[in-house]
Image (cartoon, rainbow, N blue to C red):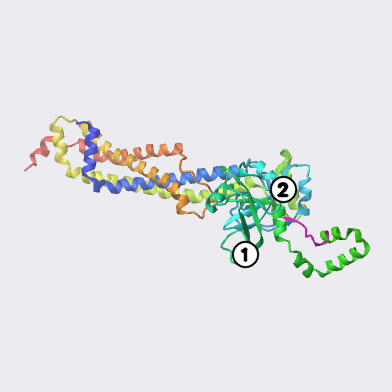
Amino acid sequence: MNRFAFAYRQIRYRKLQVLLSLLLFALSASLIAIVLLLQKQADEQLTLQAKGINLVVGAKGSPLQIVLSTLYHLDNPTGNIKKSELAFIEKHPLVAKTIPLLLGDNYKGFRIVGTNQAYYDHYQLEIKEGAYPKNEMEAIVGAKVASKLNLKIGDTFASTHGIQAEIEEGHLHEDSFKVVGILKESTYTLDHLIFTKIESYWHLHQSHHNLLHDHPEDDKKIEQVTDNKEDSTTNSIASLKQPEGEYTALLVQYKGAAGFMLPRQIQENSALQAAVPAQELQRLLLLTGGASRGLQALAALILVVSALSLLIALLSALRLRTYEMAILRSWGANKFYLFSLICIESLFIALFGTAIGLLSAHGLLFLAPFLYPENKSFALAADMFLVEELYLFGLAAAIALLAAAYPAWKAAQTDLHTTLKKLP
């Protein structure tokens, strides 16, 4: 009989004995594959989303927090800064491009980002339906937002102060946004965001009524303007009542290599915080790398346990199959046949278990959006396959052969005459 078919039949007859080894190989392969896939996709998305942004300028605080909150929308902003404080950066000779951002509101947990056309152009965000916001209180929504909230062109919604829907103290704004566009799906995590003009944010957070009552000194100034320059009263009142606009951060792209001097200039000559995304991304990857290495070590330990389990299962089965081996020898099977038979059984278990583990890993990534719908940070692709996954089959095969070496040698040493004499 073909040794592969014979080995397969032997495994079928010992289902319970090989089940533990099979599950252990599947568990270790699944854990290793998930770690590799998550790390690969996270690294790619983090790097891609920071591409072309050399500097992020914001309020004083943690540089990593500034980068996470503005580039990846994973943290709380460090605060807002007046637009005038950033004017020197926008006009700096070392700066090629700036993109302003204003954050602070959400709609049902999806963050609302105030920005301008430069942001859409930088990330090459394309329109699926409608158009980009042109007027105040117009919004364009990411593909995931439109899908999950069933938003369509012409729909209106009121935003809540705060970047998370569960913030209790967040108040609902009276004015509503109108959806004027829906973005196509992208390779970025920006599909979970809502975009509007910065002026919409300013409009929402300005209270003409509060300014009149909270700043009586302005009222006196307005009266003086009215008495002295009646023709320009309306414009003067507007300028006095209009608070200065604010930004949460400014994304900066250098004009040349000399731009690396800009962060130090900002730190020394202003009250602003300059964060370099490349440096902060490296710090972040170092932090997450420790966790991934820990999971890989756990998977390696499970793999060792899998090998021990397989070794025990093969030795246990071999004790019960002594007469079987002797009969095979009597039918003409040589020592190499018996040795290879045990090795093939071990390989079947290891490779089949690894295949189950890899399929399980991709299945979990496919189910991740349904199991964890709150995730708005990273898009996980279940259809991504890595070369390293193929290496897992080679590793499993090597471990299987190592575990089978001693039982296979024992099987090959089966003595036909001595064994058959023990038969009753």
- Residue at the front extreme of this rendering: 154
Which residues make up the magenta segment?
239-246
187 on left or right of 228: left
- 333 is within the stretch colored magenta: no
The disc, 1 or 2, on the residue closer to the chain's N-terminal end is 1
240 on left or right of 290: right
What mark, if any, has residue 85 been given in the picture?
none
- 243 is within the stretch colored magenta: yes
217 on left or right of 156: right
| Residue 70 appears in the figure | no
Q: Which residue is tagged 2?
A: 263
Q: Position of residue 158 (x, y in %)?
A: 63, 59
Q: Which quadrant would residue 254 be assigned to in this image?
A: top right
Q: Position of residue 45 (x, y in %)?
A: 56, 44
Q: Position of residue 311 (x, y in %)?
A: 28, 44
- Mark 1 lies on a secondary structure that is loop
- Give the Cα separation between the discs numbered 1 and 2: 34 Å
Residue 391 vs residue 149, the one in the foreground: 149
Q: Which residue is tagged 1?
A: 170
Quarter of the N terminus within the rendering: top left
Q: Amino acid at mark 1?
A: Gly
- Residue at the right extreme of this rendering: 228
Residue at 82%, 59% in the rendered image: 238
Residue 272 vs residue 217, the one in the foreground: 217
Label 2: how many Cα within 10 Å (few below 14, some 14–19, many 20+):
some
In the image, residue 297 above or below residue 203: above
Q: How many marks?
A: 2
Label 1: how many Cα within 10 Å (few below 14, some 14–19, many 20+):
some
Residue at 84%, 61% in the rendered image: 237
Quarter of the C terminus within the rendering: top left
Q: Amino acid at mark 2?
A: Pro
